[in-house]
Image: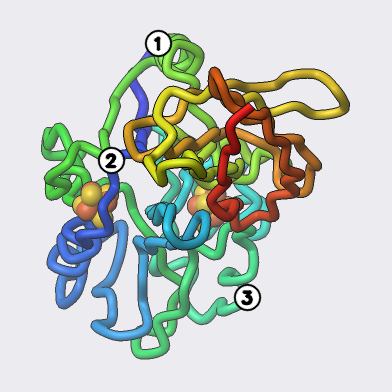
Amino acid sequence: MAKKWNMVIDLALCNDCNCCFMADKDEFTGNDWAPFSVAQPWEGARWLEIERKERGQFPQIQVVHKPGICMHCDAAPCVDASAGAIYKREDGIVIIDPVKAKGNEALVDSCPYGAISWNADAGVAQKCTGCAHLVDQGWTQPRCSQACPTGAMQFVMAEDAEMAARVAADGLEVSKPELGTTPRVYYKNMYRWTKVFVAGSAYFADNGDCAEGCEVTISKDGAAVATAVTNNYGDFLVDKLEPGAEYTVAIQAAGYKPVERKAAPTAASLTLPAVALEKA
Ligand code: SF4
Ligand code: SF4
């Protein structure tokens, strides 16, 4: 069984530095890499796109960055729609043949991930080539993952069984699995994009001190689903909750009256107002 192209992107490590994007531009703008691609335009083409999302509200906010490229799907709708102009290589890379695809702008709409763009100058649909021209020369990484300073992007050449084991061990997920396209790009810590948190803070009303060490219990339909302990600022944050669900947040500290709050986080997550704990 041959090793194949895979990419693992860790959403906990991406800091939106854009080194990957610039490396992609450097490699493909102004350069033809026959037979895989003609030069990418300077403007309007983003073969690597970084989406951004804020989570929570002041004073507890996170920003998550989600780099996306062509997923090099094993069940690629673009291949099916292309009448042979788009093909999958044995190593898993999906290529738009710039000669066979010339003039076919409809190919842009064949990708449900929006990974294909139209090069008006060359009259051809284009996307990430997986740096096939470099992989074929023995490069061990495409330009994007090579440029990533945090290790958020990791290129993995592996047999499918080996990759499946890694997916299971590291809890990797794919983007939009409901599409059934079997992507070869995997995400680690995907919950930062798909799930939400409830955060808050507590302080002691009698002395104004931050309420460190409180027990926080998050319940849904009467059953506890997560717990946390407030830190030295009295803050807590419980992640991996479901957007749109209704939770009860119970905060307890020895010698103080317990407090409950309702929390219905939207897709933007939820930071609750600070809670004052009264003496029991
Ligand atoms: S992400 Fe889009 S362009 Fe890439 S292989 Fe899948 S369907 Fe094709
Ligand atoms: S280079 Fe790495 S850390 Fe920087 S934006 Fe790209 S994936 Fe994120």
Q: Quadrant of the N terminus?
A: top left
Amino acid at pointer 3: Ala
Residue for badge 2: 13
Q: Is residue 74 among the parts visible in the rendering?
A: no
**Which picture quadrant has residue 250?**
top right
Q: Which mark is residue 106?
A: 3
Whole-Å distance between the Cαs marked 3 and 2?
Answer: 36 Å
Kindly identify the amino acid type of the residue bearing the numbered disc 1.
Glu
Horizontal relation, residue 51 to residue 111: left or right:
left
Q: Is residue 123 visible?
A: yes
Image: 263 above or below 266:
above
Q: Residue at x 35, y 37 (%)?
A: 10
- Judged left or right of residue 62, residue 216 is right
Query: Please, what secondary structure does the residue beneath circle 2 have?
Result: loop
Give the alpha-carbon distance from disc 1 to disc 2, as whole Å: 23 Å
Mark pair 1, 3: CA separation: 36 Å
Question: In the image, which disc is placed on residue 162?
Answer: 1
- Marks 3 and 2, the one that precedes in the sequence: 2
The answer to whether mark 2 is within 8 Å of ligand 2 is: yes
